[in-house]
Image (cartoon, rainbow, N blue to C red):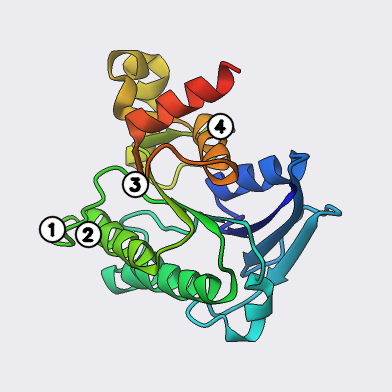
Amino acid sequence: MSKRILLAGASGMMGQMLLQLSLDSSEVKEVTSIVRKPGTIKHPKLTEIVHADFLDFTAIEQSFENQDVCFFCIGVYTGQVPPAEFHTITVGYTKAFAETLRRKSNNTSFVFLSGQGADSSEKSRILFAREKGIAENILIALNFNQLCLVRPGYIYPSIPRTEPNFSYVVFRFFYQIGVRYLYPNIGLTSRNLAGAMFVAGMQKAPKQIMENADLRKFDEERMSF
């Protein structure tokens, strides 16, 4: 049965790849993308909704109805914004979006782009780990039909991009020269991650929390068929 996809974060690296996978798939009949600014992709399957306030989706909540799969890829890099804004984007946006979806759709599979080190205890002194842990716990409490919390390590851009800060330039260099072979669970490519996330949403994820090693194995098994 063809599925309806709801996507948040289509302007980011992972959101762009999941949008393209969804549009290309014969198993997807409709994609609804909630964005702040209009994108450049036009497609018969795609309904793009421009919405300004990601803490309140009341005005467009009808777009959350009857969705089969949700890919939530909204995020911001540590240090890009002040801590309070980081909390708003990581926790506030997730909570508002997920609560609206849970209220309007009963059988959604929710795939959440989290990150390696997310702290379920919510006590970490590391901002990223603590806030992602809070967001994950909110999603778990909402009791979706299926929930997959994706925790990749370093995501190597399959499509070249301008890196957000110098540390990512360093990571990219060392990943390219072979660190990925010495420490295979340090990260994975954006293409591999997108593939694993797409299948996890469209089918059934093997577990609720998928760490980097799980994602690599899952993608390898996916490609073997």
- Position above or below: 207 against 173: below
**Disc 3 on helix, strand or loop?**
loop
Which residue type carries mark 3?
Answer: Gly
Towards the viewer: 106 or 101: 106
The one nearer the camera, 176 or 94, is: 94
Give the alpha-carbon distance from disc 1 to disc 4, as whole Å: 31 Å
Q: Earlier in the sequence, mark 4 or mark 3?
A: 3
Query: Disc 1 marks which residue?
Result: 125
Residue annotated with mark 3 = 115
Tell me which amino acid carries mark 1: Arg
Kindly report which numbered mark, 2 or 1, lies closer to the viewer in this rendering: 2
Q: Quadrant of residue 185?
A: top left
Q: Quadrant of residue 222?
A: top right
- As helix, strand or loop, the secondary structure at mark 4 comes to helix
Q: Quadrant of residue 78?
A: bottom left
Give the residue pinned by disc 4.
Answer: 191
The image shows residue 43, relative to residue 159, as above or below, that is below
Estimate the x, y position of residue 62 in percent, counting from the top left.
68, 78
For disc 2, the marked residue is 130
Regarding residue 171, the answer to whether it shows in the image is no
Of the numbered discs 3 and 2, the one sitting upstream in the chain is: 3
Q: Amino acid at mark 4?
A: Arg
